[in-house]
């Protein structure tokens, strides 16, 4: 894989821009000075040379919104994200009719237990085994003003975590295919039934035979493998004339 060009590198030790020095062994880790390279060696040594390809002229973890620190997991995540960005640039998204997955989530928040249940569901979507759904729509009503600010911060942090990295790798078998994920939220002024929540969220779902919606009932939590399961399933469905809906037990309860 040939990484895309990059004009600014970041020092792996101090985080400063315009780092022009690189580890002489792996050529993957950048530094702004010899002193930073010396100090950072204890951190870099365990993973030096583990990168799947030299990324001297590619993107580094700090610029990819990846976890900081040593470890093969971060390197693999970096590799996956670069592949996703390349796939996104090369694929024809107008004519590529991949399944479009929409996760519909309902939140009626009255106490801290409700807030924790929502946080667990959002955390699970962030940790999906493959790319998160292309669109996550959250319809919520807060009946406890004391928790409103906590809820708004939780939703804002979730949206940033989903949208900031850019393209995500959705399909790795065969030609790599990437998707971009978005988050929408609808605040309801009054308490609603599940049907009302779903009806209001459906207006944000794109029309088309390749649009699929996934939802859980109130109190349901998302399984980390749910999106990957449905991506595989929906690619094998001939069309709406043969399959209108599916029920799957890929969820857990608090």
Image (cartoon, grey):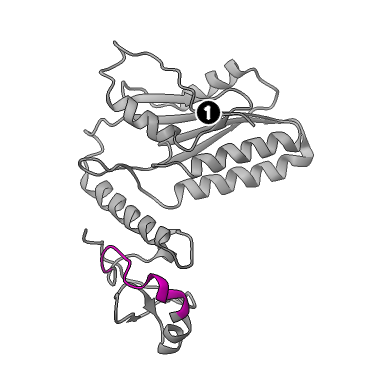
Q: Residue furthest top?
A: 241
In magenta stretch: residue 124: no
Tell me where the magenta segment starts and ends, as one range: 42-54
Residue at 21% of width from left, 47% of height from top?
90
The answer to whether residue 95 is above or below residue 39 is above
Q: In which quarter of the image is residue 143?
A: top right
Expressed as whole percent of the image width and height from the top left, the position of residue 103 reads 47, 30
Residue at 42% of width from left, 83% of height from top?
37
Q: Is residue 253 left or right of residue 161?
A: right
Secondary element under disc 1, as helix, strand or loop, is strand
Q: In this view, does 251 lie to the left or right of 108?
A: left
Question: How many dots with numbers?
Answer: 1
The answer to whether residue 169 is above or below residue 16 is above
- Using the image as rendered, state which of residue 224 and residue 182 is in the foreground: 224
Quarter of the rendering occupied by the C terminus:
top right
Expressed as whole percent of the image width and height from the top left, the position of residue 99 reads 32, 29
Q: In this view, does 147 lie to the left or right of 131?
A: right
Expressed as whole percent of the image width and height from the top left, the position of residue 10 reads 41, 73
- Using the image as rendered, state which of residue 163 and residue 116 is in the foreground: 116
Residue at 57% of width from left, 49% of height from top?
157
Quarter of the rendering occupied by the N terminus:
bottom left
- Using the image as rendered, state which of residue 100 and residue 242 is in the foreground: 242
Expressed as whole percent of the image width and height from the top left, the position of residue 217 reads 58, 22
Q: Quadrant of residue 240?
A: top left
- Which residue is labeled 1 in the image? 251
Q: Residue furthest bottom?
A: 35
Q: Quadrant of residue 35?
A: bottom left
């Amino acid at each position: 894989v040939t990484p895309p060009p990059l004009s600014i590198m970041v020092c792996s030790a101090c985080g400063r821009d315009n780092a022009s020095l690189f580890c002489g062994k792996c050529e993957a880790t950048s530094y702004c000075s010899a002193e930073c390279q010396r100090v950072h060696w204890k951190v870099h040594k365990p993973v030096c040379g583990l990168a799947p390809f030299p990324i001297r002229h590619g993107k580094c973890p700090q610029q990819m919104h990846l976890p900081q620190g040593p470890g093969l997991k971060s390197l693999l995540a970096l590799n996956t994200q670069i592949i996703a960005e390349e796939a996104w640039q090369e694929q024809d998204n107008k004519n590529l009719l991949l399944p479009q997955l929409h996760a519909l989530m309902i939140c009626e928040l009255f106490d801290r237990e409700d807030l924790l249940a929502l946080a667990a569901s959002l955390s699970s979507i962030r940790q999906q085994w493959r790319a998160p759904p292309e669109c996550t729509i959250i319809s919520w009503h807060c009946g406890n003003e004391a928790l409103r600010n906590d809820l708004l911060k939780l939703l804002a942090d979730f949206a940033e975590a989903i949208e900031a990295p850019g393209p995500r790798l959705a399909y790795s078998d065969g030609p790599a295919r990437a998707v971009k994920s978005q988050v929408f939220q609808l605040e309801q002024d009054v308490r609603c039934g599940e049907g009302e929540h779903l009806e209001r969220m459906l207006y944000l779902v794109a029309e088309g035979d390749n649009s699929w919606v996934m939802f859980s009932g109130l109190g349901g939590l998302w399984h980390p493998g749910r999106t990957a399961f449905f991506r595989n399933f929906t690619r094998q469905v001939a069309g709406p004339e043969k399959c209108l809906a599916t029920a799957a037990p890929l969820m857990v309860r608090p």
